[in-house]
Amino acid sequence: MSEYILDCKGVCKSFGGVHALQNVDLRVKRGEVHCLAGENGCGKSTIIKAISGFQPQDSGTIEFDGKVYQSLSPSVSIDQGIQVIYQDMSVFPNLTVQENLAINTVISNKQKIYNHRQQREIAKKVMATLGLDLDLDDLVETLPVASKQLIAIARALYAKAKFLILDEPTTALTRKEVERLFEIIRDLKAKGLSILFVSHKLDEMYEISDSITIMRSGQTVYTGPMATLSEEDFTHYMTGRDFSDVDNKHAEERIQRDTQPAIELNNLSGSGFAGVSFKVQPGEIVGITGQLGSGRSELCNTLFGIEKATGGTITCSGKQVTISSVEDATRNGIALVPEDRLTEGLFLPVSIMENITVVNFDKFTKGLTLDSPAQIAESADWVKEIHVKTDDHLLPVQTLSGGNQQKVVLAKWLSTKPKILILNGPTVGVDIGAKYDIYALLRDLAKQGLAVLVASDDLTEVSRLCDRTVVMRGGIMTGEIADQELTVENLTKAIM
Amino acid sequence: MNKKTKRLLGRNEFYVAAIIIVLALIIQVISGQFIAINNLVDLARAIIVNAIYALCGLLAFVSTGADVSFPMIAGMTTYIIFKVAEVTALPAFVLVAMALAIGALCGCINGFFIVKYHFNSLIVTLSTSAICYGIAFGALKGVRIDVPDAFKAFSKWNLFTVRSGITGLGAKMHGAILIMILLYVLAYLVLRHTMVGRSIYAIGGDEISARRAGIQVDKVRFGVFVVNGMIAVIGGLCYACMCKNCSPMEYYGGENIVIAAIVLGGVRLTGGHGTLLGCLLGTFLLSMVSNSLTLIGVSVYWQNVFIGLIIVIGASISAIQAKRSLKASKELGKEAA
Ligand SMILES: Nc1ncnc2c1ncn2[C@@H]1O[C@H](COP(=O)(O)OP(=O)(O)OP(=O)(O)O)[C@@H](O)[C@H]1O
Ligand SMILES: [Mg+2]
């Protein structure tokens, strides 16, 4: 028996002219947790889809558990003991929670008859694997993203696979849920399971993985043990660039201290938070940090007019304003990059170009017609500026990798040239290189006088990017942290 | 509000049932004849064929998308079979088997293009419908023909006759209603208690998730269209036998009211949603409206306006429900956060 459970050799895959995978080699030892890392769009999900048989490779071979396959199909792959938690979760929105939890098991049992009592029993057992507490009769389409992700994870864990693939499984989860998941992963590993794990969060990778493969532009560039890989080497392999200089914040050149604050909150309250007071100068980057449920998302939504404030005041550039609708917010120069981009920010089947320019339609309309060349030029600029990885920005957004879709949402809102830009979790699912690009871009915009508010629970991000941060806990603003004090350790203490 | 009530209020079936009851009361008050036994039997008889067609609509919309070919497949096949019966002396069961085979063949054509070439099902079934129309009228001169001897017995199959005590009017219940009931029972068992049935819903909910879970998406879709062809033919034969003659022209355009009825009953055009109960209720409501407006003495043209209005109301209920469930999910998200 070979030492490796999975051995992909020379795997290639193209979509039209895009070579998503070029001679990729990927080997996973039995009983290890193997991390697969790389920038957005480097082909991580694509190799996973080849292994799962959903999108077979064009050439190359996949050896699994001693058998060599030229191409796999989903049912063969599942029968061989491969379970995948897909990046987009792949649940059935129109079915109930219990059916979602049970249907994969019933399919892989090759049952012809569907027994509803059995379904309920399976569903209960599946929930127990993660200690979930969901209403079994709810339709999945009515659930929040986090629950969908938990359903996808639980159902794969229950399947008693030999090989478990997790494609960014933690994007919507709280720290507590991530810890529970990691506990289970370690447990499975102890039982001899092999695991392939994709994430953009460095701390997660170091925490859980034994070894790592790094991909760049559809090729394998590094493979080896995780523990001996330094953070610098990691970013270098991943991006081919070094990022030592971006940590310089240049705060003093940027912040316009002697003018009126771009936005000032005075004792603001709304649903889910109360008593928030702070101000942001033009050119300043201020964080709003706190755990899930601390009220930071609600605060963002209230500032953008999605939810109504119940008390307190908002002052924009010295003028007190009421923001009771998104139009009010836009009129006062406020833009929001929402947290749940996939459902709130993008039209997936429509081109990248139109997605970026849609909020600015007025600007491109001449009489009754659209000034397409101007629209295309603007979009091309943005695509270049924030490094959206695509051959052609006239392709639909859904052909982009997950992280690149997020960059498109960013570009869309940045293109409205707001005075106050609020970003809720701006780099969830975005790779390191792109993260630095986004940080640099935000600093650049701030330098031109933009006030930036960043709501995030990624403490490294807050400490690196922000000049100052507001800390929230349980819906209350508990204080501010600035300058030298703004470290990951202090933040960890503050938000707990 | 407790969760069960909330879920009930979130269903189209609930609203359609409520509208049926309210409407029945209004018509009863105005005409005094609605709850008359003969009227109820007439109504039940009137929904048989559309309720059978509604199964085609349900299966297609839930799994794939529109199917508009069922009336013309039914019309052409029935016509062909009646012609064959006129010139041969084949027994009824052979003729029915032939009819089912023709229906299945038409379904194969639909399924082949939809599955193999990923053509939009509306376009494919529209074409099939046009071809069937062409064959029925161009090649076979689709004129009205009487029920052939082989089907005479079925055509006259009367389950019972009722007579209203007040007006003295009578009504007969045709045996075809048993076929409809049988089809619904079968459909219920398949859709709810077999893997194939659950796959139909899973595919409609998210095709990619279904493929990834190992569901044979193409086979299931192909199967749905083949079965649709056969169900359509059954509906077509029932219709002709109940009318005691067959004229392909009468089948033409029959899909409109069926699709309207099932959408009213909660079938979503985007796939994955729809129930048998909803199909029956929707069909019943539309038949009831046209039947009962006649009772009150409203002209046929105004009846169409009423039907249009009801469809608009039904569609708005669906839209409002969908919006509400989206909102609920956002609120839940906040609670969880
Ligand atoms: N169906 C498709 N059609 C065209 N291009 C595609 C398709 N699927 C993937 N691609 C392209 O293949 C490349 C690899 O995409 P993939 O989804 O594997 O990236 P990824 O490494 O998973 O990125 P992320 O971290 O953002 O999820 C991207 O350039 C993407 O645009
Ligand atoms: Mg991916």
Image: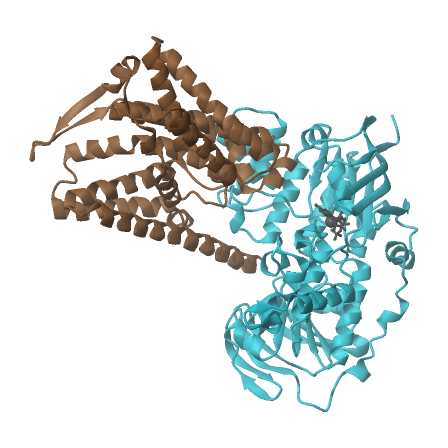
The colour one sees for chain A in the rendered image is cyan
| Chain with brown colouring | B
Q: Splitting the image into 4 quarters, where does residue B336 fall?
A: bottom right
Q: Which of the pair A490/B57 is nearer the observer?
A: B57
Location of residue B3 with respect to A270 vertically, above or below: above
Farthest bottom residue? A258
Q: Which of the pair B98/B198 is nearer the observer?
A: B98
Q: Position of residue B322 (x, y in %)?
A: 46, 52
Q: Position of residue A111 (x, y in %)?
A: 57, 24
> Is residue A120 left or right of A6 when viewed as pictured?
left
Q: Position of residue B247 (x, y in %)?
A: 31, 28
Residue at 46%, 45% in the rendered image = B269
Residue A425 visible at all: no
Q: Which of the pair A313/A374 is nearer the observer?
A: A374
Q: Position of residue B217 (x, y in %)?
A: 59, 33
Location of residue A368 with respect to B281 vertically, above or below: below
Location of residue A403 with respect to A271 vertically, above or below: above
Of the 4 image quadrants, the one containing the N terminus of chain B is bottom left
> Is residue A410 left or right of B282 when viewed as pictured?
right
Q: Which of the pair B110/B133 is nearer the observer?
A: B133
Location of residue A43 with respect to A107 vertically, above or below: below
Residue B50 visible at all: yes
> Is residue B288 left or right of A100 when viewed as pictured?
left
